[in-house]
Image (spheres, rainbow, N blue to C red):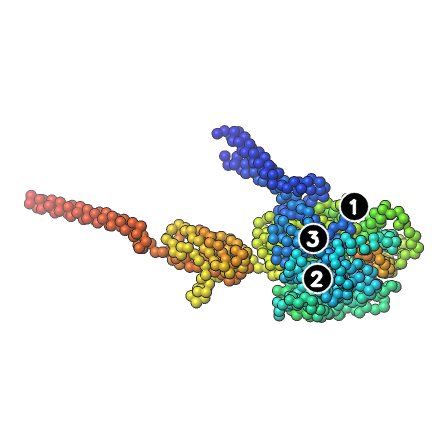
Amino acid sequence: MGAGRLRRRARSAAIGALVLAAAVALLTTPADERAVAASDDRQPSIGPGLEWVAHRDNPFRQGDDPDFINSDLAFTGDYLVQGNFAGFSIWDIADPAAPELVNAVSCPGGQGDVSAVGGLVFFSVDETMSDDSCEAARVPETEPNWEGLRIFDISDPTAPRYAAAVRTRCGSHTHTVVPDPASSERVFVYMNAYSRGASLNCTGRNPLQIIEVPLAAPEDAYVAGELDLFDDETAFGAEDRVPGGAETKTTTGCHDITAYPAKQLAVAACRGDGLLLSIADPLAPAVLAHVRDPAVAFWHSGIFDNEATRVVFQDELGDGFINTCSPAFGADRGSDGAWLIGDGGLTKVGTFKLPRTQSDLEKCVAHSGGLIPVPDRFIISQGWLEGGVSIIDFTDPAAPIELTWFDRPDYGYSMDFTAGIWSVYPYRGYLYASDMYEGLEVLRLTDPLFADAARYDDAGLNPQTQPEYSWVWREAPVVPSAAAERAPLETLAVEPATVEPSPSAVVTVSLPAGSLTPGETTDVWWMPTQTVLATLTASADGSLPPTEVTLPGALEPGTYDLVVRGDASAPSIALAAVEVSQPSPSPQAAENGGGVDWPWWLIVIVLVLVGGATAVVIARRRVVLARRRRRAGT
Amino acid sequence: MPRGARSIAGVALVAVLAACTLSGCTTGEVDQPTASFVTPSPPGDSTAAASDGAAASDSAGAEPGATAADVEFIAAMIEHHLQAVELAELAPGRVSDPELAEFADRIAVVQAAEADAMRAWLDKRRSRDRANGAHDHGVMAGEISRSTFDRAATLSGPAFDELFIAAMVPHHRGALEMAEERLAEHGDSTVARWARAIATSQSLEIDRLLEIEARLRGG
């Protein structure tokens, strides 16, 4: 076959594939989706290795009215809670590609920062409202008002219940859930807020108020403690106020706190100050380090790496209502700062600024984000308002780089207040981004670098309460050798339990109900080579349905361990010993007719031996006879 | 042969990517949520009377839109910001302290951008409602006088630094006064949030300017 003809064939095959793929695509694309894709002129720019999986409109949106914008996100099981200045949305994300709005809970009061603990939702109110009800109106801060934390019970997400309202003196700009190390029945909520001055209830230094929430009785939530993180700072004086009462002191409270309970640490972003806290006693956080930086205008939030050796702080220069992502602002202003956590406190080592210049009709500055659990790396997802989503690698904190992005163009005009991506976090292998006006975006990182991050099946996530990630599936299980320790683990059923020596063998493994965490990702490990034979999903009843796996060979006689381990139930394992039999005769082999074969071989051997012996005897006799003849002849 | 096989694979990959583009891998799945709005009743010890559920838009309708106080505040704050920009723009070539130089540069870009954002807000309202047009503001709180600008233009080195701080601190304190005045009024919540943001950021800057001043005096 000539080369030219081959190429023509290849080309026509490829064109065929293209046409087929396009036809399939058109057939499988819903009509409304094509219409939106065609009519929406604000299609985002999407970087490499990022898939746009789903979009859902903001159900609260009222045109360009900023009283209905989305804010932060929290996750509990299959549900995503999306805060809004007018309430919150509950999304069912069991299928990440098709989020379903379960409910939009109308309860105005910005900025609606949310957390979710089991069936409870905590909602921050930092606007002075006429009262704590869901029909409250915004009132001037100099009039009688309410601000604080609302607690909802969404155990039945189709029927949310307003369970409690806890007032705090300066409300709650953001809040942070800190588990009680002594009891899983209650959590603490750090109320992050700052005063500004002439308001009725909120003046002077605002202490950190800590709410205790009994999870089974949220209506009993109360302010359990308060402390001033800035004791060492000069107190407010008359000279720190202007006529009218507004304060000119900046150290008045914190904007946001990120806790890392497993490390007993937290970072606090307190407007003009950055703090590293010990939260060993969650009711008495202690300042370990206090930094200021002339380059940082507004300490907004922080993200730890998994080892708690590094932290990235965001500088929300301009409070989100201007575009700092332009050459006029340069590469350092309104940026991320990377700091090392050491014995000497915090040391700044690098900065990162969104590399894509944004239009001055947009709002763009460093905003909220979270850690993507990639082993041995420090990679975060972060929102930049109308600068979009950025995935940033801080593994070398002195030289951070952007890996990919999702960025819509401007609206054609400047939005009031602020707009764009509030925050973006990884959850169960997908990224969820909260866009203030547009709604919810679901994204997926496709690079193999994110395979381990994608495998995480979180039970829930409040991004400001960082979990410690461990990648249990990357390390082979450790199997005890003592019989007494092995016996209780030997729950894994293997059929057949004994196999013949062979190049490989197929066996069926299974576990009864209740053995595994329902739905968890589960590996079948072959311990002789410490390799994963199959990655399966546990059933809803915690069983492992019968599954065939191929044991790699060559299988020499002996006893070998087969282990099943689930990601969530690790380090516990289920064990089975697989027997590879000796190649000696067995009753089974005899029944199969093998018994007829061996005498035949024996007969052959006997015949050969007898024949050989006969030949030797005959040969010797000839030699002997010949000698005799020679002697007789002489 | 291998070459042909590679090109088939290559074009097939392109075909798959094209399919992805068309089927929504890059355009995302779009779906209008069928919003089910609920307004939960307040908890037992609520300070508010229980109610029987209003839609989100109802509570919005109860809140006022832009008021005269909003328009007045925004128009005055734009002018106020432009004064800060004007003084800060005098700094290059005159300022001597490096931290103050960086600080002045930041004030110039930030307040110019904020003034633009506020002007966009104002232009939208003015085109909507001409009655809420320009107001006469008289003297602004913390206003920098023309003679101060003139003097600043003639100074350099530590003398400029001293004048810069001496003029900018009262100027920023004036912005706080203006913000608090607006925050005592009803009005557009965007304007209230901006007023808080401006008060917050300018109080930070006052703090830093006073720190620099203390350092310069101490040195």
Q: Position of residue B143 (x, y in %)?
A: 90, 57
Circle 3 residue: B36
What numbered label is drawn on residue A292?
Answer: none
The crowding category of the residue bearing disc 3, from other C-alpha atoms within 10 Å (few below 14, some 14 to 19, many at least 20), is: some
* Residue type indicated by callout 2: Tyr
State the SS at label 1.
loop
Name the spot of residue B189 as percent of width and height, x first. 80, 55
Q: Is residue A432 left or right of residue A231?
A: left
Between discs 1 and 2, the one toward the N terminus: 2
Q: Is residue A319 visible?
A: yes
CB under 8 Å between callouts 1 and 3?
A: no
Spatial CA distance of label 2 from label 3 is: 16 Å
Mark 1 vs mark 2: same chain?
A: yes
**Chain of the residue that carries numbered disc 2 in the rendered image:** A
Report the residue marked by disc 1: A413
Q: Residues within 10 Å of mark 2 (few under 14, many from 20)?
A: many
Residue B184, position as x, y percentages in the image? 85, 60
What is the C-alpha distance between the residues marked 1 and 3? Answer: 31 Å
Which residue appears farthest toward the front when viewing the image?
B52
Q: At x 71% / y 69%, what residue is drawn? A: A222
What element does badge 3 sit on? loop
Q: Which mark is residue A162?
A: 2
| Residue type, label 1 | Tyr
Quadrant of residue A226 in the image? bottom right
Q: Nearer the viewer, residue B23 or B26?
A: B23
Identify the image quadrant of the C terminus of chain A.
Answer: top left
